Amino acid sequence: MSGHHPPLTCAEVRLALKVLGFKARPGRGSHEHWIKETPDGRRKVTVDCPKAPFSQTLIDSMRRQAGVTKDEFYQACGR
């Protein structure tokens, strides 16, 4: 899938995180926190849906927090 990566909607990011095994936890204000327990500890991804569609900078930040490559993140959201 390498190559062009389009912006993602909040729904697509939520789907990717669910597919990757994260669970939503209430956040403050517009921020959602998605948590996943791993053998190496807890991973937390912060999603700010009012910022959607998400730029590549924000997508990179979320996928790094999730511990996956950009291609893995896009595949998990069905892109």
Image: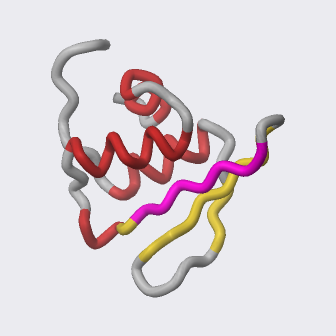
Question: Is 75 located above or below residue 13 in the figure?
Answer: above
Residue 11 coordinates in the image, percent (x, y): 40, 55
Q: Name the quadrant containing residue 63.
A: top left
Residue 70 coordinates in the image, percent (x, y): 37, 28
Q: Residue furthest bottom?
A: 29
As drawn, is 60 to the left or to the right of 13?
left
Residue visible at 51% across and 70% down in the picture:
32
Give the main secondary structure of the magenta stretch.
Answer: strand
Q: Quadrant of the N terminus?
A: top left
As drawn, is 46 to the left or to the right of 60?
right
Q: Residue furthest right?
A: 39
* Closer-to-camera residue (33/16): 33
Question: Is 37 located above or below residue 68 in the figure?
Answer: below
* Closer-to-camera residue (10/64): 64
Q: How is the image coloured?
A: secondary structure
Question: Is 9 located above or below residue 30 in the figure?
Answer: above
Residue visible at 61% across and 77% down in the picture:
26
Q: Residue furthest front?
A: 40
Residue 33 coordinates in the image, percent (x, y): 56, 66
Q: Disc count in the image? A: 0
Residue visible at 36% across and 58% down in the picture:
10
As drawn, is 38 to the left or to the right of 57?
right
Q: State yes or no: residue 42 in magenta.
A: yes
Residue 7 coordinates in the image, percent (x, y): 20, 43
Q: Name the quadrant containing residue 30.
A: bottom left
Q: Quadrant of the C terminus?
A: top left
Residue visible at 21% across and 56% down in the picture:
53
Which residues fall within the magenta stretch? 41-47
Q: State yes or no: residue 44 in magenta.
A: yes
Question: Is 11 located above or below residue 29 in the figure?
Answer: above
